[in-house]
Image (spheres, coloured by chain):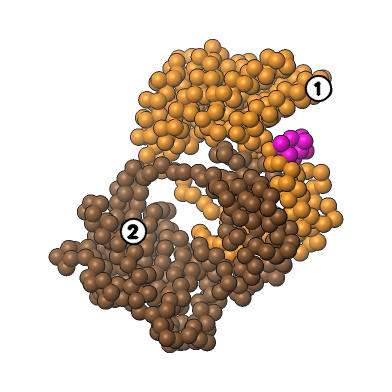
Chain colours: A brown, B orange
Amino acid sequence: VLGLDVVLADGELISTGRRTVKGVAGYDLTSLFVGSEGTLGVVVAATLKLRPLPVATATLAAHFDDITSAAAAVTAITAAGLQPAVAELLDGATLAAIEAAFGPAVDDGNAIGAGAAAGAFLLVQTDGSAAEAEAEQIFQVLLRHAKTVSRADGAAEAERLLEVRRRALPALERRGRVLIEDVAVPRTRLAEAVAEIQGISRTFAVPVFTMAHAADGNLHPIIVVDRDRELDEDVWAAADAIFTMALRLGGTLTGEHGIGVLKRRWLVDELGERNLALQRQLRSVFDPRGILNPGKAV
Amino acid sequence: VLGLDVVLADGELISTGRRTVKGVAGYDLTSLFVGSEGTLGVVVAATLKLRPLPVATATLAAHFDDITSAAAAVTAITAAGLQPAVAELLDGATLAAIEAAFGPAVDDGNAIGAGAAAGAFLLVQTDGSAAEAEAEQIFQVLLRHAKTVSRADGAAEAERLLEVRRRALPALERRGRVLIEDVAVPRTRLAEAVAEIQGISRTFAVPVFTMAHAADGNLHPIIVVDRDRELDEDVWAAADAIFTMALRLGGTLTGEHGIGVLKRRWLVDELGERNLALQRQLRSVFDPRGILNPGKAV
């Protein structure tokens, strides 16, 4: 985001940022507004920097005995300096839910597929002019960790694999009420994080389905409860344990979706008292009367 | 910059940001501190995201009849969706100053060189696994605009070309007092900007030497005056004309070096009254007693 037009709390319109590739005039108000969840002003226009469409993509699929091995494989990929554009990880429970909801993800006759028997499934996509070369290097790393590794043969097969991932949330929503978490950990701690999440699920007897944007260390552990069950103490205790684990591993409460209402009570644990107090003072500069999305975010 | 440790004006230490690839907990204080020129706190530690070293580079050199054609060539490169890692542009006056100070930049026997006769010189480098392919595409674009285009043969030759660029500022400093400007314009307006800078130099009879990080639209027009001459009214009038031109073309007063002291008087023209007032209020939140780098930036 290079620049924004923002209507302030008193109705005045300002512009932030720039239309140039670089620019450092004054404080970076653009970044301050991005992710502020509507609490500093109302964004009415944005100037974006675009990237060219990738000239090529290559897609790999791997099955693992369990999600811990899959997470370790992703850490090995990023530790090797490889930068996949996509590294979507699904645990066995999520795969089973997808298969129960939508049937087998791909034809049995096809060597590449999610398959209910898999302990964990990883979908990797590289892009750009080095897509082929990078995919080959990632293939070699995966061979050391995975049960099977295969290469999508063409765009249609790659699309079928991406569709498996896209079905995950709809499949879980058929099972009950979902509480979607969004923690992120340093990429070297990914295997620890998924192992701890499995332990938390057992400890609190709360079903947790884990999917991840794994190359970012961004985990979506999804708690699913019966539709007629409230989000009770056990659910919140499990969520609390997940947040606490993420922070202990050097991570964050929220990789991409923000604090909103649900995570406000944990925010001080991540930011510290003084940082949070500063954020509230900044908010008051923009919204002294507290009329912008009150009760949300900081 | 992923995160910072900052000592606040009252001596308390806070941490901002994160150690994860992604994270959106609270407002982005990290970006607010970056570029704040020491006015919000004292940064004592920073967590940085690193990129892998490029696996390959390729280097091109081109001579042009004048800087306007060279600027148009760079606009054509970026408009074609090509993304050079380096696109350093030097005008003829700067080339002559380098040659006067350090002698011919490269051997006469060598086909690649700056050469005092050149109207303008452009050094382009691509990197990454597509470096070769991208350099070839850029070569083709340059052929349509340049007098000559050549390819550096190996790392030593590429280094000699980069050395030409590095000598520019030392060469100008031998000539007198330098006032280094740092405007940026949208990349499509680069040719207009360099033409206007030439006109401003003539109008105010002030020597302006132009170099640019051209693929970013970031221009360094450098005003050089005799060492015993003050930066007088004509110099400031020329600087004012350059800033006004940059803003009129949709650009910024400062692409990368900040506002400091010299550019404060123009900042309101770029930001607008209300934006600047907000920035001052933010500053007061962090530094109510005005002890952090007083008089600088906003």
Left or right: B58 as drawn, with respect to B66: left
Q: Position of residue B298 (x, y in %)?
A: 75, 44
Q: Position of residue B211 (x, y in %)?
A: 60, 26
Other-residue count near label 1 (Cα within 10 Å), few / some / many at <14 / 14–19 / ≥20: few
| Mark in front: 1 vs 2 | 1
Left or right: A72 as drawn, with respect to A263: left
Q: Amino acid at mark 1?
A: Glu
Other-residue count near label 2 (Cα within 10 Å), few / some / many at <14 / 14–19 / ≥20: many
Residue B46 forms part of the magenta stretch: no
Residue occupying the point 77% across, 53% down: B281
Q: Amino acid at mark 2?
A: Val
Q: Note whether A238 is above or below B6 in the view shown.
A: below
Which quarter of the picture shows residue A60? bottom left
Residue occupying the point 34% across, 64% down: A166
Q: Which residue is mark 2?
A: A124
Nearest to the observer: residue A143 or residue B216: B216
Query: Is residue B259 visible to the viewer in this orientation of the structure?
Result: no
Which quarter of the picture shows residue B151? top left
Please report the bounds of the magenta region as a residue range: B258-269
Which quarter of the picture shows residue B268? top right
Residue B268 forms part of the magenta stretch: yes
Q: Which residue is mark 1?
A: B233
Q: Position of residue B136 (x, y in %)?
A: 36, 30
Nearest to the observer: residue A296 or residue B124: A296
Q: Position of residue A245 (x, y in %)?
A: 52, 75
